[in-house]
Amino acid sequence: MLVQKSPLTKHRDTGLVYFTKTIKGKEDLDWRSFNEGYPQGMRSGDYNLVISGGGNDVNGQYWGKASDDTGDFN
């Protein structure tokens, strides 16, 4: 059985949802705003990142980086 996790990233001030994705159990998600339809990146501010395991435990890591140059991510 595969555990489904659905990350949700939402800007706290505007309520704008940047993405929701379904990830199969034990898979990774490498999400970069400039590759996902936000060439100018995401707006600054506070975000909620929600990961749900559909009633199952979710173990994971989150890592983020901010820059004004996409070359910093290579």
Image (cartoon, rainbow, N blue to C red):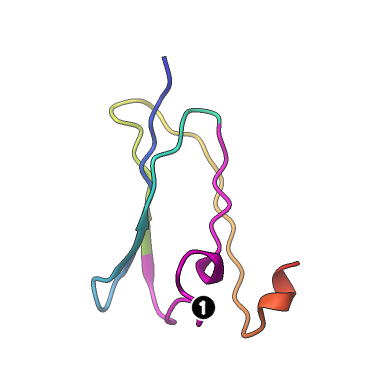
Q: Quadrant of residue 17?
A: bottom left
| Front one among 55 and 25 | 25
Residue range corresponding to the magenta coloring: 27-47
Residue 43, position as x, y percentages in the image: 42, 81
Residue 40 position, x and y percent, is: 50, 82
Dot 1: within a 10 Å radius of its alpha carbon, few (fewer than 14), some, or many (20 or more) residues? few
Query: In what element is the residue under mark 1?
Result: loop
What residue appears at the point 48 percent right and 64 percent down from the top-left corner? Answer: 36
Residue extending furthest toward the left: 15
The residue under the point 54% across, 46% down is: 29
Q: Is residue 65 above or below residue 45?
A: above
The residue indicated by pointer 1 is: 39
In what quadrant of the picture does the C terminus appear?
A: bottom right
Q: Is residue 38 above or below residue 5?
A: below
Position of 39 with respect to 7 (left or right) is: right
Residue 52 in magenta stretch: no
- At x 44%, y 82%, the residue is 44
Which quarter of the figure is the N terminus placed in?
A: top left
Residue 14 point in image, percent of width and height: 25, 78
Q: Quadrant of residue 58?
A: top left
Number of numbered discs overlaid on the protein picture: 1
Residue at the right extreme of this rendering? 74
Residue sitting farthest toward the bottom: 68
Q: Which amino acid, by three-letter code, is at mark 1?
A: Pro
* Residue 41 is covered by the magenta coloring: yes
Where residue 51 appears, as percent x and y from the top left, is 38, 44
Q: Predominant secondary structure in magenta?
A: loop
At a point 39% along the width and 47% down the height, the residue shown is: 21
